[in-house]
Image: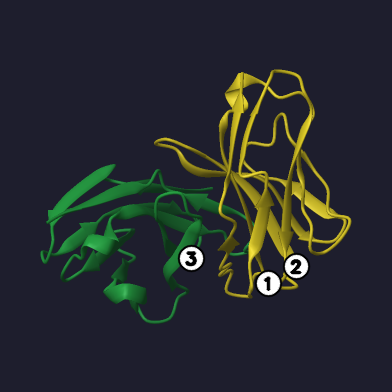
Chain colours: A yellow, B green
Amino acid sequence: EAQVTQNPRYLITVTGKKLTVTCSQNMNHEYMSWYRQDPGLGLRQIYYSMNVEVTDKGDVPEGYKVSRKEKRNFPLILESPSPNQTSLYFCASSFTPSLSGANVLTFGAGSRLTVL
Amino acid sequence: AQSVTQLDSHVSVSEGTPVLLRCNYSSSYSPSLFWYVQHPNKGLQLLLKYTSAATLVKGINGFEAEFKKSETSFHLTKPSAHMSDAAEYFCVVNHPSGNMLTFGGGTRLMVNP
């Protein structure tokens, strides 16, 4: 089944303890992206990657890192988590955006992170 | 720059009545526009997309949206609500490069029996 898989789905951690949220897709998509969802703010883009070894900042990259060493994987790293990073995180992927700019995303099921 | 405003954070309708979820966008170029739906504890699923072809776009589950450039709107409609339509809906504008997507704040649709 074509899908985007995120792990863990739920995590409670403490301030400053490094964590990684993994994201893997099995659709051979070039484009991958991370979002955080907060009430009333919709989804905000953290980082995106157009292909292997190519990553760019989105709207809210502060406090996050990413890497794209393989096409299928795009982990999100929080080096020193803080309580304001408590949120619901989504990974998404797609084929290279078309010339029309229409980027149709496939989303993972989400990872709910709580930082105490 | 681009932005999206969903005019209602919550909409409540009765089953069998029409649904209207409003979305206005701001963009300095010709955007692509999308509606995604999020059911509880699920990821987002594409409902429909507009990419500069027909201005009236049909999506899954009987939903439609009309692109009105003069009003910078992309409202989502459905003639008759079903209980299974209860979810959160997001309007999204896509930069022409395809790289940057901007989401609206979401509209939670409640369907009453």
State whether residue B104 is above or below residue A30.
Answer: above
What residue would you read off at disc 2? A30
**Residue B33 visible at all:** no
Q: Which amino acid does label 1 sit on?
A: Phe
Nearer to us of marks 2 and 3 is: 2
- CA distance for labels 2 and 3: 24 Å
- The three-letter amino acid code for the residue at tag 3 is Ser
Q: How far apart are marks 1 and 2 (CA)?
A: 5 Å
Callout 3 crowding tier (Cα within 10 Å): few <14, some 14–19, many ≥20: some
The residue where tag 3 is placed is B30
Residue A95 badge: 1
Quarter of the picture holding the N terminus of chain A: bottom right
Question: What type is the residue that disc 2 sits on?
Answer: Glu
Q: B111 above or below A63?
A: below
Mark identifier at residue B75: none
Residue occupying the point 43% across, 81% down:
B53
